[in-house]
Image (tube, rainbow, N blue to C red):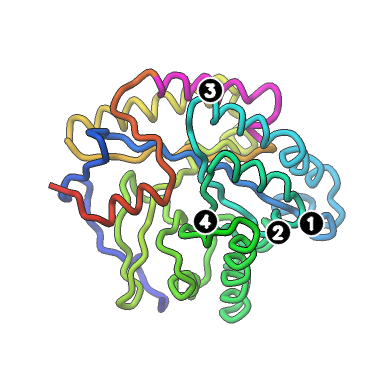
Amino acid sequence: MKPRRYGPFDYKPINRRPKITWPDDNHLALWVVPNIETFPLDEPVPGGTGIAPDVINWATRDYGARVGVFRIMEVLNKHDIRGTVALNSEVCDDYSEIIEDALDLKWEFMGHNQSNSRYLHTIEENPGRKIVADTLDQIQAATGTRPKGWLSSGLQQNWTTLDALIDCGVEYIADFINDDQPYVMDVDGRQIYSIPYSLELNDLPQFLRMGRTAEEFAEMIRRQFDTLYRESIDSRSGRVIAICLHPFVIGVPHRISALDDALAYINGHDGVWKATGNEIIEHFAKGETF
């Protein structure tokens, strides 16, 4: 898209939209997004020292791949939730066993750049387009399915990222964290959907930047759930609650119970649709509103 003042979508306040319905009389969609990432040791780690090797920052992230992600898998499976993985495609080579286990769990895979050490907003148009295409190709080769969703590393894009995604067949993107419902984006006459992602119910900023405790994060999830659950009933229009996870953050021993406790709370309520990103967007795209 061309540089512009506002996003490639109309401003439509939530109290002036058609009502959204979810399947089976559910009114709140639960979307859980594990970010499964890789950080090459010979490249600077974002937010780290800026020098490679950055062992202390690299090793904590490698812990997530060696240990933490399997705790997330165990908890989500316990609560009958399939994750939608935001996947760095180089994970397919670096940590191929994770892909095997995620496939066994029938998780969905979104594109998430090649590694988490390279952000699209720092890259020119043609190399950026190639990163998008190569990311999707590598994930498809490893999983057997071409991703329909995308989350940019660091939620950062350049001006042609949306065009590149549409060219490659991507149907939805999670970068625009500006709503509690999906919506349609118009990119110079072509369409892609936005799905609600979150920096609020996101373990990385909450624990590592804001200093939350495990108990505080679990309470945040419960409070967010309660509000969206009530609003989806009162307005008779569906909402999405996204819980965004990083194995090296929530997957450490003293935090994983926070996820377990919060999901147990959510599971105690009727009217919750536990869905993947593609399921949410496929249903939304049918236009089942009233």
Q: Does the magenta run of residues contain 78?
A: no
**Which of the marked residues, 1 or 2, is nearer the chain's N terminus?**
1
Residue 75 or residue 16, whichever sits in front: 75
Q: Secondary structure at mark 3?
A: helix
The residue identified by callout 2 is 90
Q: Which residues are magenta?
A: 249-267
Marks 3/4: CA distance?
26 Å
Q: Does the magenta run of residues contain 250?
A: yes
Instruction: Count how many numbered circles sit on residues in the image.
Output: 4
The residue identified by callout 4 is 151
Disc 2 residue type (three-letter): Glu
Marks 3/1: CA distance?
32 Å
**Which of the marked residues, 3 or 1, is nearer the chain's N terminus?**
1
Closest to the camera, between mark 3 and mark 4, is 4
Q: Could you classify mark 4 by the number of other residues whose Cα lies within 10 Å: few (under 14), some (14-19), or many (20 or more)?
A: many
Q: Could you classify mark 2 by the number of other residues whose Cα lies within 10 Å: few (under 14), some (14-19), or many (20 or more)?
A: many
- Residue 152, given in percent of the width and then of the height, sits at 55, 59
The residue identified by callout 3 is 216
Disc 4 residue type (three-letter): Leu
Q: Is residue 264 shown left or right of residue 45?
A: left
The residue identified by callout 1 is 40
**Which of the marked residues, 4 or 2, is nearer the chain's N terminus?**
2
Q: Secondary structure at mark 2?
A: loop
Disc 1 residue type (three-letter): Pro
Q: Secondary structure at mark 4?
A: loop
Check whether the beta carbons of the residues at disc 1 and disc 2 lie within 8 A of each other: yes
